[in-house]
Amino acid sequence: MDKKIKWLRIAYWTTAIADFVVAVLVLIPARMGVPNYVYPMGLMSAVAFSWAVALLIADRKPADRRWFIIPTILVVALLGVVGLHAGIIGLIPLIRGILTLFITAILLSILIYSYMISRELT
C-alpha cells in the first residue's frame, strides 16, 4: 500500500476510534463532571458517533475524500480547547484537561501529517 494512502487511513481510523470513545464517555455523567445525564451530552454523543462513521466512510476512498481531514482538524482542535478550558475553570480536574490537550496534539499531528503528505494524490 502506498505510504500516503496508509497515512490517510491511519488518520481516518485513529480519529474515528477517538470519536467512538468520546461518544461513549459523554454518556457517563460522572466522567463529564456532572451528577446526572443532561441533554447536551446526548447531542454530543450523537455528533461524535456520526463523525466517526463519516471518517470510516472516508476511508473507503481515502485519496478522494482526503478533504474530510480539514474539518476533522477543526473539530479535534476545538474539542482539545474545550477540554483544557474545562480543566482550567475547575469543571474537571486540571490534569484531565491537560491529558485531553495531549491526546488532541497527537491526533492533530497525525491528521496534519497525513494531509500534508497526501497532497500529490489529488
Image (tube, grey):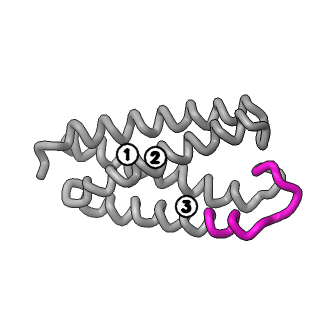
State which region is magenta: 32-44
Up-down relation of residue 66 to residue 94 (above or below): below
Between 1 and 74, the residue placed more toward the observer is 74
The image quadrant that residue 55 belongs to is bottom left
Graded by Cα atoms within 10 Å as few (under 14), some (14 to 19) or many (20 or more), the crowding at tag 2 reads: some
Where is residue 74 drawn, in percent x and y? 42, 48
Looking at the image, do the residues carrying marks 2 and 3 touch, with CB atoms under 8 Å apart? no
* Residue at (77, 58) in percent of width and height: 28
User: Which residue is disc 3 drawn over?
Assistant: 48
Question: Mark 1: which amino acid?
Answer: Ala
* Disc number placed over residue 51 in the picture, else none: none
In magenta segment, residue 38: yes
Q: Disc 3 versus disc 1: distance between alpha carbons?
A: 16 Å
Q: CA distance from mark 1 to mark 2?
A: 5 Å
Which residue lies under the disc numbered 2? 14
Which of label 2 and label 3 is nearer to you? 3
Verify whether residue 29 appears in magenta. Answer: no
Secondary structure state at the residue bearing disc 1 = helix
